[in-house]
Structures are given as C-alpha cells and as structure tokens.
Image (tube, helix red, strand yellow):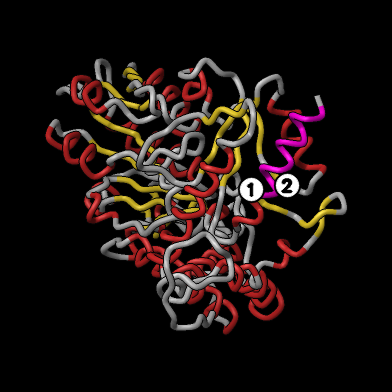
C-alpha cells in the first residue's frame, strides 16, 4: 500500500503520520471487518493476541487463487500446477526473508506454532532426549510450549524444568542461569508472552544455553506482528510462528530450523510429497524441507501468508513499533484510571498485551459487558495457566492491541469498564 512520506512526533493519534508515513487510520482502510458493527456499535477488535484481522490484500489473494489458479502443487505438469507451485514456493522464500533465514530450504510449513512445536518434540526431541535430560520451560509459556514437552519427556524419561518468573512477569534470569547445566538439552521460550506481553532477552538467553550445548526453540507467535525478527541474529535453533496472528489465514504457519539440525531430523508424518521413491523394500525420503511436509499442504494458506507478509513489510516497521509503543503507554495510563482495575505483569520490555482483573467482576462477565458495546476482548486462562497461577489467578480479561487500534478505541474501552463498575 502507498503511504505519504511525512514525519511526525510520537503520538497514539490514528490519523497523524508516524516516521515513514505510517498511520493507523490509513491502515484501517485495508481491513473490511473493522468497519462492521457488533450489537449496534462500531466494532473494536482488542483480541489480537488470539487472532488478527485480515487486510483486503490477503482476502483478495485467496479469492484470486481459488478463482483463477486452484491446483495441487509440485507434481503437476500443467500450467495451473506450475503457477500454484511457484506461488507456494514464493511464500516459502518470503517467510525466509521475513525471518532473516539463510535459505527458503530452512522453512517448513505447518498449521501453526502448536504444530511446529509438536513437530520438533516428536522428531528432534524423540531422537535427542533421554533419561536425565532437562528441558527448561519458563512459567511464562503458552500451553502449546509446555504440553508437547511434557509428552515427549514422559516418553523419553527426560524432565521438564519450569523457570520461575519475577513479580514483574519477567523470566528470572538468575534462576535461569542456575538451572542450566550439562543435563539441559533444550530451552523453549516465547519471544513475547501472550498473557503478560513480556519480551524476554531471547538473544542473551540463547547464547547462555548454547554454552551448555543446549538447543533453543523460540515461540514467535506473539512477536512477529509487532517487531522485526532475525533468526540469525538471535542464533535460534528453532523459530515458530502462526500466520493467523500475522494478518494471514488460519491453519498456516512456519517453522525455521537451523539447516544442519533440519538435515538430521526424521520425518514425523508420511505420505505423498515427502518422498523420492517408494517400494515395499525401501522408501527414500525427499530432502528438507519437503521431507517434513507430508500430503497436500495448505496451499491457499501459504498464498494468504505471502500476501500478509508482503503487506506488513510494505509498512515502515519501525514506525509501526513506535506507534504501538505509544498506544500501549496511552492505554496503560488510561486503564489505571478505572476503579478496581489491576493490570497483571509490568515488565518494561513488552508488547501491547494488557491482561487485567476488575474488582468484584468475573472476567467472563467483563468480556460479556464489553461485547455489548462492540468491544472484543478475551477472558479465561489464555492457555497460560502457570503464568496466571504465578499471580494467584485462574482467569483474567485481556485486551491486546495491534497496529490498527486507536486511542479513541482505548477511550471507549475505559468508558465501558467504568460503566460496568458504576452499574454495580
């Protein structure tokens, strides 16, 4: 999309350009769903940590694929098969570039972060974990970065070791350093928390883990939409993300793996597309990454992911990050004026995930009240029960911001929450 080449001071004002020409108001024009009403009120989408909305460029790319180029890939000799294959592999190249990966061959397409983590657990984990080995997993993590390790640890007789949090919701770095040892085979950490917004020092934690010979898997589901990622700079061994949190369709995601590690990973599913030859005596598998992609892939999902990556990278990412930071600061100050509202987590390095409780109100009641005003937030345990338990909670409400949210929407959120408190 084309944006004006102007500069402005850092503010959360939707219509005022940021450095690089970014404005939230201009971006909002690309999102049809943001112009609908819910319960007679203009929609305010504050559930971005669960899923982001899709720009028209993604929607149009899906329509164009199904309307003009629908075909299976890799094995067809006809024109549409070639076109679909080229678009699919262009998506792989775009993701590699987006993550700063050395090669498209380092990228495996999956359904999302959850499947990516399970893939690593069931392939690399099964081959490399054994009795007495440790898997370090911070209390901060999403269930998708806890449960797969519990399952493979039970099978291999390894041990999942939780890394505690500080009162501010940061990973306790002293405890982390103390827990690392020659027994540590893997560290699994999120690049940004889905419940506290915390952005851990992943690069430094990775470097420390590597001193002990441990591998590091980074869950980037919440990070990729908010700030640029360079897997080579992080020196991550594995990096996973989900397309639907990056303005792309559901059911598609990607896993980056260091090439020397991916080359040694056995297939985790079998079928078409991942073989070189098959007979009843011996099957020869394809080279990576195709060896890890059995069957027909989510072709339209990759097309949509390609469009989403192209859309996002056409923006000035630094300007986007500056706007989101200003909007988060505005939201923190505004929410602090709501009687009885307590924000959970206060890490200085964070994305705009605002999880809170409201005195005297069940989180589900809070979400239902806000929905009546057209405001979509999430309530529950957010698939992060250990993180909430750190604060003595079983559930909380969560408002999560994206580049298309505005200070006016924050004001409406605050007004609605005040209305709920006044209604008691």
- Residue 363 percent location from the top left of the image: 68, 27
Q: Is residue 117 visible?
A: yes
Q: Which badge, 2 or 1, comes first in the chain's sequence?
A: 1
Quarter of the N terminus within the rendering: bottom right
Residue 238, relative to residue 228: is it above or below?
A: above
- List the single residue furthest toward the left: 211
For label 2, the residue is 375
Q: Which residues are magenta?
A: 411-423
Q: Is residue 22 magenta?
A: no
Residue at (48% x, 56% y) in the render: 324
The C terminus, quarter of image: top right
In front of the other: 111 or 247 = 247
Q: Give the class, few, some or many, for how many residues have Cα within 10 Å of label 1's Cα (few <14, many ≥20).
A: many
**Is residue 253 found left or right of 182 in the rendered image?**
right
Give the quadrant of residue 414: top right
Foreground: 223 or 218? 223
**Residue placed under numbered mark 1 in the picture:** 46
* Numbered badge on residue 20: none
Q: Is residue 412 magenta?
A: yes
Residue 218 pos. (x, y %): 35, 42
Helix, strand or loop at label 1? It is loop
Name the one closer to the observer, 195 or 416: 416
Secondary structure mainly formed by the magenta segment: helix
Q: Is residue 217 left or right of residue 11?
A: left
């Amino acid at each position: 999309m084309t944006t004006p080449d102007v500069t402005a001071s850092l503010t959360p004002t939707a219509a005022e350009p940021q450095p690089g020409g970014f404005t939230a108001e201009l971006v909002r024009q690309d999102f049809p769903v943001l112009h609908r009403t819910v319960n007679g009120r203009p929609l305010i989408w504050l559930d971005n940590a669960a899923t982001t909305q899709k720009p028209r460029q993604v929607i149009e790319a899906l329509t164009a694929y199904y309307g003009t180029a629908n075909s299976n890939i890799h094995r067809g000799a006809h024109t549409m098969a070639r076109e679909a294959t080229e678009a699919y592999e262009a998506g792989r190249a775009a993701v590699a570039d987006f993550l700063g990966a050395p090669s498209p061959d380092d990228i495996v397409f999956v359904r999302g972060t959850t499947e990516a983590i399970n893939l690593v657990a069931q392939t690399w984990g099964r081959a490399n974990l054994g009795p007495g080995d440790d898997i370090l997993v911070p209390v901060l993590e999403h269930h998708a970065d806890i449960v797969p390790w519990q399952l493979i640890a039970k099978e291999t007789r390894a041990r999942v070791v939780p890394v505690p949090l500080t009162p501010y919701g940061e990973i306790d770095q002293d405890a982390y350093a103390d827990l690392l040892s020659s027994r540590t085979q893997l560290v699994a950490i999120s690049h940004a928390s889905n419940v506290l917004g915390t952005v851990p020092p992943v690069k430094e934690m990775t470097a420390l883990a590597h001193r002990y010979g441990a591998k590091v898997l980074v869950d980037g589901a919440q990070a990729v939409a908010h700030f640029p990622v360079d897997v080579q700079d992080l020196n991550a061994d594995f990096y996973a993300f989900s397309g639907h949190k990056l303005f792309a369709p559901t059911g598609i995601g990607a896993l980056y793996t260091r090439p020397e590690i991916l080359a040694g990973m056995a297939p985790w599913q079998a079928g078409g597309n991942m073989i070189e030859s098959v007979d009843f005596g011996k099957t020869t598998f394809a080279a990576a990454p195709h060896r890890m992609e059995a069957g027909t892939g989510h072709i339209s999902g990759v097309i949509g992911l390609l469009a989403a990556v192209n859309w996002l990278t056409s923006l000035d990412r630094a300007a986007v990050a500056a706007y989101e930071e200003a909007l988060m600061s505005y939201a923190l100050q505004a929410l602090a004026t709501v009687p009885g509202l307590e924000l959970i987590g206060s890490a200085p390095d964070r994305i705009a995930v605002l999880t809170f409780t409201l005195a005297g109100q069940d989180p589900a009641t809070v979400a239902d009240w806000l929905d009546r005003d057209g405001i979509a937030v999430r309530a529950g345990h957010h698939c992060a029960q250990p993180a909430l338990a750190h604060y003595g909670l079983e559930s909380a409400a969560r408002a999560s911001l994206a580049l298309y949210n505005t200070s006016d929407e924050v004001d409406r959120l605050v007004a609605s929450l005040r209305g709920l408190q006044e209604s008691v």
